[in-house]
Image (cartoon, grey):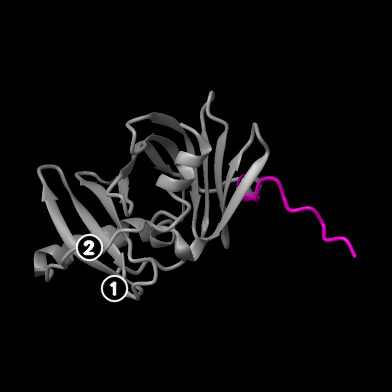
Amino acid sequence: MDTQTTRRALLLAAPALLLPGAAHALTPADQALVDKAVAYLQGMPSARGRFVQTDPRGSMTQGALYLQRPGRARFEYDPPSSLLVVSDGRVVSVADKRLKTVNRYFLTQTPLKLFLADEIRLDRGVTVSRVTKMTDGFELTAQDRAGKTRGQIVLTFADSPMQLLGWKITDARNAETRVRLTSLVRVSDLDPALFRAPFPKPPTRR
């Protein structure tokens, strides 16, 4: 998978540009699942694990992930990929370690903001437009309430035990990028160096 494909498909670091679908009124049972998901995410301030990403062309890559609320994340792709995605709490950097290039986006413009906030809220700033029940879990479709990104992300959870399994983003071309978590465990502490922006900008000359 090349850097341009990742930048465009954007598993993480750019708005998911999709016209919102029709919202469905949530039933009390739906809302109970939303509340359950929020409580789970809120109870996981730090975590590490592994992920598998499938891009719109069907190419698969994998790597290690580290999450630390508020706002910090690291997705480090296994070789031969040289991609690294880091959120330092304010900016998300998509870097190619081999080419030493980097593209940056504000965290507030990305789907990561949904589950890296200090206080997880799915009733403020975003709208859960659909809750889909499955045999062993459920999915939440969330959209930007203000409509600034006109996007949506689908979060998938298992409910026995409760666990985030991954997410799906669909772009304006109706192309899907999926991230499946093969493991995700709570940890008590993570090295702050994991979340330093790669390839810092050179100092401005005066």
In the rendered image of this protein, does residue 26 appear above or below residue 199? below
Total numbered labels = 2
Position in image of residue 22 (x %, y %): 15, 66
Q: Amino acid at mark 2?
A: Val
Quarter of the picture holding the C terminus: bottom right
Residue at the image point whose x is 9% and y is 68% from the top: 27
**Span colored in magenta:** 194-206
Badge 1: few (under 14), some or many (20 or more) residues near its Cα, within 10 Å? few
- Residue at the limit of the structure toward the front, as seen here: 173
Disc 2, SS: helix
Q: Is residue 175 visible?
A: yes
- Tag 1 near tag 2, CB within 8 Å: yes
> Chief secondary structure of the magenta span?
loop
Residue 63, position as x, y percentages in the image: 47, 32
Note whether 147 is above or below 187 in the view shown. below
Write down the quadrant of residue 5 in the picture: top left
Distance between mark 1 and mark 2 Cα atoms: 9 Å
Outermost residue toward the top in this view: 80
Report the side of 133 relative to 80 (left or right). left
Q: Which is nearer the N-term, disc 1 or disc 2?
A: 2
Q: Which residue is mark 2?
A: 34
Asked whether, in this view, residue 195 is left or right of residue 75, the answer is right
Return the x and y of residue 131 as percentages of the image width and height.
16, 59
Percent x, y of residue 174: 27, 49
Amino acid at pointer 1:
Asp
Residue 196 is a magenta residue: yes
Label disc, if present, on residue 90 of the rendered structure = none
For image coordinates 56% across by 40% down, the residue present is 84
Query: Does the segment drawn in magenta span residue 151?
Result: no
Q: Which residue is mark 1?
A: 123
Question: Relative to the observer, which residue lies in front, 14 or 74?
Answer: 14
